[in-house]
Image: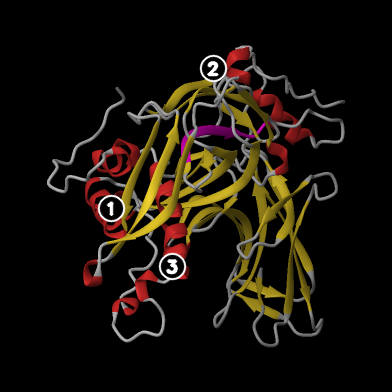
Amino acid sequence: MAETVADTRRLITKPQNLNDAYGPPSNFLEIDVSNPQTVGVGRGRFTTYEIRVKTNLPIFKLKESTVRRRYSDSEWLRSELERESKVVVPPLPGKAFLRQLPFRGDDGIFDDNFIEERKQGLEQFINKVAGHPLAQNERCLHMFLQDEIIDKSYTPSKIRHA
Amino acid sequence: MSFFGFGQSVEVEILLNDAESRKRAEHKTEDGKKEKYFLFYDGETVSGKVSLALKNPNKRLEHQGIKIEFIGQIELYYDRGNHHEFVSLVKDLARPGEISQSQAFDFEFTHVEKPYESYTGQNVKLRYFLRATISRRLNDVVKEMDIVVHTLSTYPELNSSIKMEVGIEDCLHIEFEYNKSKYHLKDVIVGKIYFLLVRIKIKHMEIDIIKRETTGTGPNVYHENDTIAKYEIMDGAPVRGESIPIRLFLAGYELTPTMRDINKKFSVRYYLNLVLIDEEERRYFKQQEVVLWRKGDIVRKSMSHQAAIASQRFEGTASLGGR
C-alpha cells in the first residue's frame, strides 16, 4: 500500500504591490565618519570627526545631517546608552592612555595612523548602535547624530515615532 | 544487560514467542548509539520463554526461586538510586529447588498496559524491560531484555493553524503562519512569513526546531533545550509585501512525540523558533509550541495480529493519544 503523499502546497499569499517590490527599501541608514581635524593649540588640542547621516527611517528627524564630534562625545553616548537602554552596547576603539604620555617618538594621539584607526573604529561603533531598534528610541542617540551641540545636562527620554 | 559473576555456572536467555514476526525499532541508548529492540504497543501481550543453559552439565544449580518481571520505569539521571516503576508485573517460574539440566520456562504477560512511549533523553530515561532472576544465597543471576514501546495517535479532531502578527514597533512587523498546530512525525510543516514592515537590514531568516526536556517538580524544575534542526528559509533582505514560504519535512529529524507530564516526572515539548538575523548579527525571534504525535503505520499483512489490533484500536477514535 502506498503512503499518502504529504500535502506540501504553499499557503495562499497576497500578491505583492509592485511599488513595494521595486521601490526604494525603507531601511536605508548610512552613517559615515570622515574628515578628521585637529583643533586648538598646545595641550588643549583635540581631534574632531565629521559624522554624516543619510537615512529614510522615519524615527530620524532629519533625512540628512552632518555634525562634528570628538572621541569623548562617543564615550558619553556609550555610557548614556548603557545606563538608559537595555542594549548591550558594542565597544569603542581604544582610549589610548599610553599615547597621551609625553616623550613619545611619534605624534601620540595626533598621529595620522592612529587617527585613521580611531576613525574606522568610530564608524563601526556608530553604525552598529544606530541600527539597533532599541537604541533608536533613545534621545541621546539622536542628539549625538543630529543636534549641532550635545547638551550633557539634558533629560534622558525615549523618542516615539513622530 | 546481564550481570555475570565470576565463574557463572548458568547462561540465561529471554526469548519471545513472536520474535520472527515482531517488528524491531531503532532507539538511541544513553551513550548515543542506535540499537534495535522489539517493538510493542499498549495492550499487547508479552509472551516467551526463559531458557537456562547449564555450563557444566554435571554440576547442579541450587536456587531460591526463578521469576520473570515486566517493568516499565522512569529513571532520572540525577537521582539514579530511585527508579519510578509505573508498570511492575511478576510471574514466578520455579519454586526454590535445583536445576539439574538445561531447561526453558514459558511465561505470558497478557494485555500489558504500556501507557507511555520509551524515551531516552538528556536527563531522564523511560524504559520497558523483561527481567529474569534466579535467586541464590550469595548472588542472584539476572538477565534483562529491553523493549521499545511506541504510543500511537490518530489524526486530531481539532488542528487549527497558527497565525500571528508580531514585531517591534515601527521597525519590523511580520505575520507568520503555520498550516497546523499538531504535526505527526513524518509530516511537513507548511507555512509562510509575510513582511508588513521592514525598517531593519535583514541578512537571513531560519526556522529552528527546539526540543525542551523538563525534569523535576516545584522549585527543582530543570529545562534542557536542544536545537534539533536549523533550516534556512530566506537568504537576503526582504521588503514590505514579500511572502516567504516554509516547507519543512519532519521525517529527516530525530523527533519523539510530545510527552506532557509523564507520570508527573518529566515532559518533552517541541517548539518552532523563527529567527531573523540582521546585518549586525542581531537576532530577532519568535517561539511557538507545536504538538508532535506518532501516526500508526498502515496495517500490513505481515504485521502481527496483535499489533494490527493495536493500530485498529485508534481508527474511529478522534482523540489525540497520550495521558
Is any part of residue B271 visible from this angle?
A: no
Q: Is residue A95 visible?
A: yes
Going from N to C along the chain, the mark reached first, 3 or 1, is 3
- Say which residue appears at 43% left-offset and 50% top-offset: A33
Q: Report x, y in % for residue A37.
A: 37, 58
Neighbour tally class for label 1: few under 14, some 14-19, many 20 plus, Cα within 10 Å: few
Question: In terms of secondary structure, where does tag 1 sit?
Answer: helix
| Picture quadrant of residue B149 | top right
Q: Which residue is mark 2?
A: B158
Foreground residue among B46 and B201: B201
Q: Which residue is mark 1?
A: B219
Name the residue located 24 percent from the left edge and 71 percent from the top edge.
A42
Label 3: which residue? B81
The three-letter code of the residue at mark 2 reads Leu
In contact (CB < 8 Å): disc 3 and disc 1: no
What chain does badge 1 belong to?
B
Q: Quadrant of residue A75?
A: bottom left
Confirm whether the magenta stretch covers residue A9.
Answer: no
In the image, the segment drawn in magenta is B284-295
Prevailing secondary structure of the magenta residues: strand
Q: Earlier in the sequence, mark 2 or mark 1?
A: 2
Q: Are marks 3 and 2 in contact (CB under 8 Å)?
A: no
Taking B115 as reference, is B85 above or below it? below
Mark 2 residue element: loop
B288 magenta-colored: yes
Mark 3 surroundings within 10 Å by alpha-carbon count, few (fewer than 14), some (14 through 19), many (20 or more) = few
Residue type at mark 1 is Pro
Which quarter shows the N terminus of chain B? bottom right
Residue B60 falls in image quadrant? bottom right
Which badge, 3 or 2, is on the more N-terminal residue?
Answer: 3
Q: Chain of mark 2?
A: B
